[in-house]
Amino acid sequence: MSDLIDREARFLMQTYRRRPVVFTAGEGSWLIDAEGRRYLDFLTGLAVVSVGHANPRVARAVADQMERLTHTSNLFYTEPMVALAERLAEVSGLDRVFFANCGATANEAAIKLARRWGRERRGPGCYQVVSLLDSFHGRTLATLAATGQPDKQAAFAPLPPGFVQVPRGDLDALEAAVGAETAAVLIETIQGEGGVVPLDADYLQAVRRLCDEREVLLIVDDVQAGIGRTGHWFSWQGLGFRPDVATSAKALANGLPIGACLATDEVASAFRPGDHATTFGGGPVVCAAALAVLDEIADRALLENCRDRGRQLRQLLESVSGVSEVRGRGLLLAAVLDRPRASQVVDEALAQGLVVNDVRPDAVRFAPPLTVTADEVESAVERFAQALRD
């Protein structure tokens, strides 16, 4: 292990603070390190491995597609891309899809679509995107400009213009920010990187009404909260509204790189051939993996399992000494600690064989696979409680 860590330090750009574990395999809710030790994975690669490590259905779909066709570019048609677009339209209630490579590039597509739509509706002065403080939308320059976390932005200033942030939950501030130059409001229903903070349903519905009144688009960044993570295909489906544009990525292909920007017919029509493109987005292999993920969720009733296990996980965490609050929805939860010691607790949890992460100094994020069992939830909370005691 030490040799691998030394090689990483020599040859990789040092953009990550990695914990000193080398994982070599995974199975379901479990990860296995180079020494053969097993860990309950309640982070799943940042809410990515939605149907479990080494999922047989996904593995078969990827292997079968690799043996037939890997890549053609988007100059030609392929069946997996079209089939996945159909499925996503069906489960989302939106109409059209652009496939990207990750959440940030899906959000880039959504921002470009909003600006193109605004230009058509009101001219070149309609390009602004209003988002929320403590939001996170990606690390490209545009998505970083949309992100409401100044500490992540400072090193890369000046950022692209046209982005404004207001406090979450403050409808008056949002109303004041949305004007003639505004093309879209961009929100997460749960601010995952902001500490797993769920936005109130009444507030989200009011944002929808405001966007309708001001004739601006509502974009939902569902990169972390979508594809079953809250017990619904998409997070807004349990909250009483529908966006004009939405993005998805993390859980969609169970670890393979994919992003998706979805929109209504009326909004999607703003894009013309040549307005946006990607070399790898929507490739046959990742789309085959995503179709297998959607089949797994549907066939194994994993939305229901997410809701059941989410309630169980919340109740057990609430009973742990040292936890002052549990927030989130479904299987995207944070245990808020009684004082800011999350990093130390996460280190100790790893020693106890539990993978979680410190999303804020006083908050530990839990995002197990949708396939997680009741026994695994109990075991994870026992390990977490021991980590807090230690």
Image (cartoon, grey):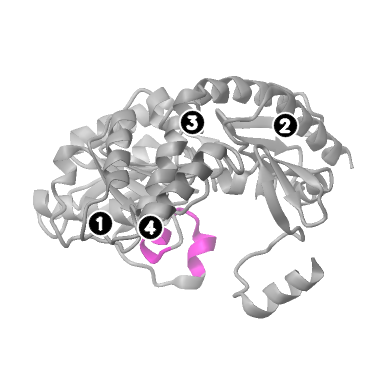
Given contact means CB atoms under 8 Å apart, are the residues at marks 3 and 2 in contact?
no
The boundaries of the magenta stretch are 140-154
Given contact means CB atoms under 8 Å apart, are the residues at marks 1 and 2 in contact?
no
Task: Identify the residue position indicated by label 3 in the image.
Answer: 296
Using the image, determine if residue 325 lies above or below residue 115.
Answer: above
Label 4 CA crowd tier, 10 Å (few <14, some 14–19, many 20+): few
Image coordinates of residue 110 in percent, x first then y, are: 29, 51
Q: CA distance from mark 4 to mark 1?
A: 28 Å
Residue at screen point 67% across, 39% down: 42
Q: CA distance from mark 2 to mark 4?
A: 49 Å
The numbered disc on residue 70 is: 4
- Name which residue type carries label 1: Lys
The numbered disc on residue 112 is: 1
The C terminus appears in which quarter of the rendering?
Answer: top right
- Name which residue type carries label 3: Glu
Image coordinates of residue 234 in percent, x first then y, are: 40, 32
Label 2 CA crowd tier, 10 Å (few <14, some 14–19, many 20+): some
Could you tell me which secondary element the residue under label 4 belongs to?
loop
Viewer-closest of 101 and 114? 101
Residue at screen point 43% across, 54% down: 66
Foreground: disc 1 or disc 2? 1
Labels 3 and 4: the sequence-earlier one = 4
